[in-house]
């Protein structure tokens, strides 16, 4: 090592350590950090009551349950039969297209809602070992089997109030009449061609 490289390294080292605080140096914080902000007034921050009673562009978000919850005891048609959101969904037949990453989440959410009963799940794919880390309805013993069949079996076993019927095949294989039986169709597809 030459004398010039040694002096350059020493100068760089001195420059790096010269800006560090010393034990004897006092660290002074900017005055803006020491000042406390005044709290917002009640008028400025509003209240939970203000938020919950605010008019909503959604029809089901009015009345005594304004945040989108539904009241299953409401009689909307005067016949004594409830037509609330829960009964409409409970009696509806639902089609979930896709039983992969999105489909697993959709099926889980439908099952855990406790409202849905009849679901048909449709998927053409089979389970690969790489699916197991993110598609939680499948186990290593399911590798090579139909995603729709394994997903429906899992949900039916864990959630006895559900009736999930599998269909292993393409959505293009079914005619329009098949799709007319469903009140709700939920897409969990990752295939662009199938989405069209």
Image (cartoon, rainbow, N blue to C red):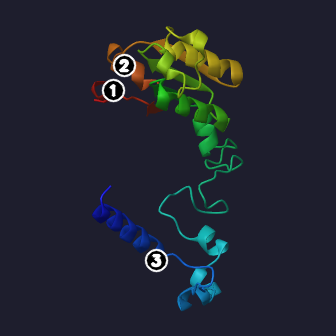
Q: CA distance from mark 1 to mark 3?
A: 59 Å
Question: The residue tagged with tag 2: helix, strand or loop?
Answer: helix
> Where is mark 1, residue-wise?
191
Q: Are marks 2 and 3 in contact (CB under 8 Å)?
A: no
Residue 88 sits above or below residue 49 on the image:
above
| Mark 1 residue crowding within 10 angstroms, few (<14) / some (14–19) / many (20+) | few
Residue 24 shows in this picture: yes
Q: Which quadrant of the rendered structure holds the N terminus? A: bottom left
Give the mark nearest the N terminus, 2 or 3: 3
Give the mark nearest the N terminus, 1 or 2: 2
Residue at screen point 37% across, 71% down: 11
Residue 109 sits above or below residue 69 on the image:
above
> Where is mark 2, residue-wise?
171
Name the residue nearer the viewer: 84 or 23: 23
Which of labels 1 and 3 is toward the front? 3
Residue 35 sits in which quadrant? Answer: bottom right
> Where is mark 3, residue-wise?
18
Q: Are marks 1 and 3 in contact (CB under 8 Å)?
A: no
Q: Are marks 1 and 2 in contact (CB under 8 Å)?
A: no
Give the mark nearest the N terminus, 1 or 3: 3
Residue 45 sits in which quadrant? Answer: bottom right
Residue at screen point 63% across, 27% down: 117
Q: Position of residue 26 (x, y in %)?
A: 60, 86
| Mark 3 residue crowding within 10 angstroms, few (<14) / some (14–19) / many (20+) | few
| Mark 2 residue crowding within 10 angstroms, few (<14) / some (14–19) / many (20+) | some
Q: Position of residue 77 (x, y in %)?
A: 61, 47
For this view, does 182 lie left or right of residue 118?
A: left
Residue at screen point 51% across, 8% down: 145
In the image, which disc is placed on residue 179? none
Q: Position of residue 148 (x, y in %)?
A: 51, 16
């Amino acid at each position: 090592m030459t004398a010039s490289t040694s002096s350059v390294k020493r100068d760089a080292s001195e420059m790096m350590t010269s800006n560090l605080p010393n034990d004897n140096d006092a660290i002074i914080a900017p005055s803006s950090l020491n000042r406390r902000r005044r709290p917002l007034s009640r008028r400025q921050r509003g209240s939970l009551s203000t938020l919950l009673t605010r008019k909503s562009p959604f029809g089901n978000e009015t009345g005594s349950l304004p945040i989108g919850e539904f009241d299953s005891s409401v009689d909307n048609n005067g016949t004594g039969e409830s037509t609330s959101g829960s009964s409409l969904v409970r009696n509806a037949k639902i089609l979930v297209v896709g039983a992969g990453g999105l489909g697993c989440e959709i099926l889980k959410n439908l099952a855990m809602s406790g409202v849905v009963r009849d679901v048909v799940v449709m998927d053409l794919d089979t389970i690969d070992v790489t699916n197991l880390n993110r598609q939680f309805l499948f186990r290593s013993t399911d590798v090579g089997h139909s995603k729709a069949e394994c997903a429906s079996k899992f949900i039916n076993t864990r959630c006895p109030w559900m009736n999930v019927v599998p269909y292993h095949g393409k959505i293009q294989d079914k005619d329009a009449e098949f799709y007319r039986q469903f009140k709700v169709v939920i897409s969990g597809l990752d295939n662009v061609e199938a989405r069209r």
